[in-house]
Image (cartoon, rainbow, N blue to C red):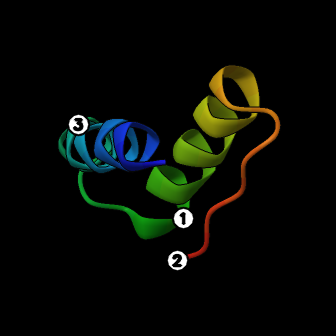
Amino acid sequence: AMAAMARLRASLRAYAVMEGEDPVAVLSDLELLLRLTEPARSATA
């Protein structure tokens, strides 16, 4: 779980830079990443 959280945190930072800090776009990208890489896990924001 800690490794998955670390990946999500790093991805969140990267998406924030790429999307210009648009929260909706960042969370949408993060949700897609989580669905593809960790289908059995969930996260909240």
Q: Earlier in the sequence, mark 1 or mark 3?
A: 3
Q: Are marks 1 and 3 in contact (CB under 8 Å)?
A: no
| Residue at 21% from the left image edge and 47% from the top image edge | 13
Q: Position of residue 29 (x, y in %)?
A: 55, 40
Q: Position of residue 42 (x, y in %)?
A: 71, 57
Q: Residues within 10 Å of mark 1 (few under 14, many from 20)?
A: few
Q: Earlier in the sequence, mark 1 or mark 2?
A: 1
Circle on res. 14? 3
Q: Give the amino acid type for the residue marked by disc 2 in the picture.
A: Ala
Q: Position of residue 11 (x, y in %)?
A: 33, 37
On the image, which quarter does residue 33 sit in?
top right
Picture layout, residue 45 above or below residue 21:
below
* Circle 2 SS class: loop
Circle on res. 34? none
Q: Residues within 10 Å of mark 3 (few under 14, many from 20)?
A: some
Q: Give the amino acid type for the residue marked by disc 1 in the picture.
A: Val
Report the side of 8 relative to 29 (left or right). Answer: left
Which one is in front, 19 or 32? 32
| Residue at 52% from the left image edge and 77% from the top image edge | 45
Residue under pointer 2: 45
Circle on res. 24? 1
